[in-house]
Image (spheres, rainbow, N blue to C red):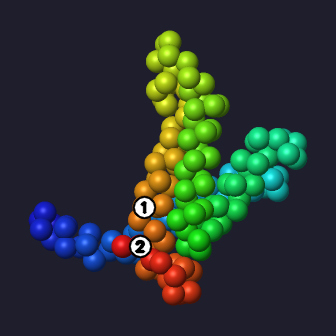
Amino acid sequence: MTTRALAATAARLETPLYTALRAVAGAMFMFHGAQKILGWLAAGPGPAAGTQLWFGGIIELAAGTLIALGLFTRAAAFLASGTMAVAYLQFHWKLALSGFAWLPAVNKGELAALYCFLFLYVTARGPGAISVDALRGGPRGH
């Protein structure tokens, strides 16, 4: 396949691929919250109600569901992005500068950093054409 043919194919698939990215990322985020809040496939008990981790789980569960569905997508993605920024800074990096502790590969914060920037992109891009927001006649983004 030539570069031009690949570009043409990619352009045709942009809408369904963005929808898949948004839906899969939202569902994966939702399952993190389901583990914490509902105990689904959890290795142990979840965080105590009212704690910071519990609120994080509620955000993961609710925002992940909304992002996956493409409903109130920008607001949900913005909240999810901020939650993951806090998770990275507070629980992974901890503002430690020695020993390369700021690197995600060292502090095990790759997933939090990736979710943070992915959801920030979803905030900017919007729900897309294949979403509940689009069905409702709401804003679709690009």
**To which residue does mark 2 refer?**
141
Res 43 seen here: no
Residue at 28 percent of width and 77 percent of height? 12
Identify the image quadrant of residue 10.
bottom left
Residue at 88 percent of width and 47 percent of height? 49
Identify the image quadrant of residue 64.
bottom right
Query: Going by the image, does 68 lie left or right of 39?
Result: left
Q: What residue type is labelled 1?
A: Ala
Residue placed furthest toward the top? 98
Task: Decide which of tag 2 and tag 1 comes sooner along the chain.
Answer: 1
Q: In this picture, is 18 found above or below 98?
A: below
Residue at 50 percent of width and 55 percent of height? 119
Q: Do the residues labelled 2 and 1 touch (CB within 8 Å)?
A: yes
Residue 139: x and y in percent read: 47, 78
Q: In this picture, is 105 found above or below 138?
A: above
Describe the element under mark 2 as helix, strand or loop. Answer: loop
**To which residue does mark 1 refer?**
124
Describe the element under mark 1 as helix, strand or loop. Answer: helix
Identify the image quadrant of residue 90.
top right
> Any mark on residue 94, and which?
none
Residue at 52 percent of width and 82 percent of height? 138
- Label 2 neighbourhood size at 10 Å, few (<14), some (14-19), many (20+)? some
Q: What residue type is labelled 2?
A: Gly
Residue 19: x and y in percent read: 46, 71
Res 78 seen here: yes
Residue 44: x and y in percent read: 84, 41
Query: Going by the image, does 50 lie left or right of 106?
Result: right
Q: In whole angstroms, how far apart are the C-alphas of marks 2 and 1?
A: 8 Å
Q: Which of 121 and 42 is in front in this view?
A: 121
- Label 1 neighbourhood size at 10 Å, few (<14), some (14-19), many (20+)? few
Residue 50: x and y in percent read: 85, 45
Q: In what quadrant of the picture does the N terminus appear? A: bottom left
